Amino acid sequence: MVAAGVNRADLLQRQGYYPPPPGASPVIGLEVSGVIDEVGADVTGWSPGDPAVALLAGGGYAEFVAVPAGQVLPPPDGIDLVSAAGLIEVAATVVSNFDHVHLAAGETVLVHGGTGGIGTFAIQYARAIGARVLTTAGSPAKLELCRDLGADVAIDYRTWAAAVANATSGEGVDVILDVIGAKDLEVNVNSLATPSRSATGWSSSACRADARVPSTWASSSPSGGRRDRDQPARASGRRQGPRSVPRCSAARGRWWRPGRSGSLPRPGSHSTRSPMPIAGSSRAGTPARSC
């Protein structure tokens, strides 16, 4: 192990709010980077000494981790292993949720929290897909950063609903990537076009919310989300793991290259060299509401 990412999920688990899935290590840590030490007999494509990043269900705050081969990727070109440890969790979250709602070129997506870990990655990835990106943030400097990352429209989150309506000529957006949760649920619903899609992977507010959903939207606009931590391993060529990991591998030429994720002012989550004490956990990148 070279480094481990520090995510909001780690902080919630430490506080007792987010237990690991059955059978996973109770040790905190969902993403790591390092060098392959040993490979299983049936593993191909990896050799001892290869640099790698990995997505875990738990156990990352350690000197060594055992990981299914399908949850391991080469690090992005031009990015050191310490920085790379803070990328794979947000990458898998964004890719799996955009896949879940089939975000396509020519569609309009609203990314809440554009300067958070999920937001900075999602803006760039959505642009790489060919979508029009609207995003929210809370200060002129943050709004400028969103535009630098590729957002077509950057909006003050205090007045975002009216601004989204104006930017879409009242039609609404096709997809919302939401990291706020219950507090903005009804406003999000009202900002969606018909048909449209919405999903929530992570949120920073309460897990329960009530909203008046128009019957036309309810029948034509699916809502959902994905949490990779709870996804079972599955076969995928030489790799076995959550679907988002091989998808990240297939898509890495779009966004894991210098000038995209390599130019971020900060990666999707903080990373720290291993070994590290749990007590040293610091602020994390914001996990996401998905598309």
Image (cartoon, rainbow, N blue to C red):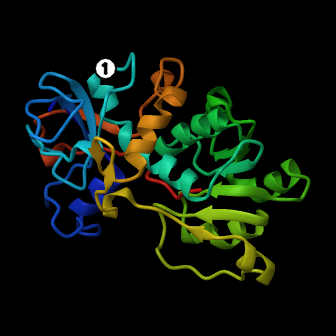
Looking at the picture, how far across and down is residue 71, in whole percent? 28, 45
What residue is at 50 percent from the left and 35 percent from the top? Answer: 251
Q: Can residue 156 be seen in this view?
A: yes
Looking at the picture, how far across and down is residue 51, in whole percent? 23, 24
What residue is at 10 percent from the left and 40 percent from the top? Answer: 40
Residue, disc 1: 80
Looking at the picture, how far across and down is residue 169, in whole percent? 91, 53
Please tell me whether residue 161 is drawn above or below residue 115 in the rendered image.
below
| Label 1 element class | loop
Quarter of the image for residue 105 reads top right
What residue is at 26 percent from the left and 49 percent from the top? Answer: 30
Quarter of the picture holding the C terminus? bottom right
Q: Can residue 285 be seen in this view?
A: no
Left of 93 or right of it: where is 236?
Answer: left
The crowding category of the residue bearing disc 1, from other C-alpha atoms within 10 Å (few below 14, some 14 to 19, many at least 20), is: few
Looking at the picture, how far across and down is residue 46, in whole percent? 20, 29
Please tell me which residue lies in front, 144 or 28.
28
Please tell me which residue lies in front, 192 or 279.
192
What residue is at 18 percent from the left and 38 percent from the top? Answer: 43
Quarter of the picture holding the N terminus? top left
Tag 1: residue type?
Asp
* Picture mark count: 1
- Furthest toward the right, the residue is 169
Quarter of the image for residue 283 reads top left
